[in-house]
Image: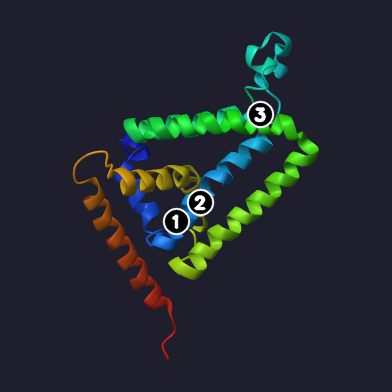
Amino acid sequence: MGRKRLFDLEKHFASYGAYHSNPVNILLHTVFVWPIFFTSLVLFYFTPSICELFGLQPQCYLARHGLFLNLGFFFALLYAVFYVCMDRKAGSLAALLCMACWVGASLLARHLDFSLAWKVVLAAQLLCWIGHFLGHGLFEKRAPALLDNLVQTFLMAPFFVLFEVLKTVFGYEPYPGFHASIKKKIDAQIADWKEKKQKMEPYP
């Protein structure tokens, strides 16, 4: 039962979608979420690798090509495995993107070196997070989901925006009726949030 709830696609998407129902906010997330993931991997490139910790660095094939089994690798792998477990088709595509981001981020970090990489990452992260919060403040009119469920938000955000693209461009859904079911759950959660918000507002 615990595993089923952990990888409950409808539950996660309804929970995340309730905070991201405005089209402009969704668009801003589509633009900025994956760069946040990518630039995080750039910074994680400079963490120690398993090969280094166990003294295998000279013999490590990946290391000779600038790829290290470090925190960035396991971070990307965690996301990749989680997405595949959520949905075989879209999750496999998301997993490929995660590992492609790891490779690209590793090569970029190697080229920049830490002295420049952290400045690039800081600038990119600031830009992306500003866009993220503007989307919520100006268009969604609701605080980001990360204020309520930090772990779920960071895990679901890249998959959610990819799913939105697949749905919009290709009409993809994991199984018939998925989007209809999600919409009902999102509408119910938004209605519940509005009701609670109204109760908390002071009477005039």
Q: Position of residue 38 (x, y in %)?
A: 58, 39
Query: Which residue type carries mark 2?
Result: Val
Q: Categorize mark 1 by other alpha carbons within 10 Å: few (<14), some (14-19), many (20+).
A: some
Instruction: Mark 2 and mark 1 in contact? Answer it, CB < 8 Å.
Output: yes
Q: Quadrant of the C terminus?
A: bottom left
Residues packed near mark 2 inside 10 Å, few (<14), some (14 to 19) or many (20 plus): some
Furthest-bottom residue in this view: 204
Q: Secondary structure at mark 3?
A: helix
Q: Which residue is mark 1?
A: 27
Question: Rounded to the nearest whole Å, what is the CA distance between mark 3 and mark 1?
Answer: 28 Å
Any part of residue 2 in sight: yes
State the SS at label 2.
helix
Q: Which residue is outermost to the right?
A: 115
Reading the image, the residue beneath label 2 is 31
Indicate how the structure is coloured in the image.
rainbow
Q: Residue furthest top?
A: 59
Q: Position of residue 124 (x, y in %)?
A: 65, 49
Q: Residue at x 24, y 46 (%)?
A: 178
Decide if residue 140 is on the left or right side of residue 100. left
Mark 3, Cα crowd under 10 Å, few <14 / some 14-19 / many 20+, is some
From the image, tell me which residue sits under label 3.
107
Amino acid of disc 3: Leu
Kindly identify which numbered label has been placed on residue 91.
none
Please report the residue visible at 66 percent of the width from the left and 19 percent of the height from the top: 50
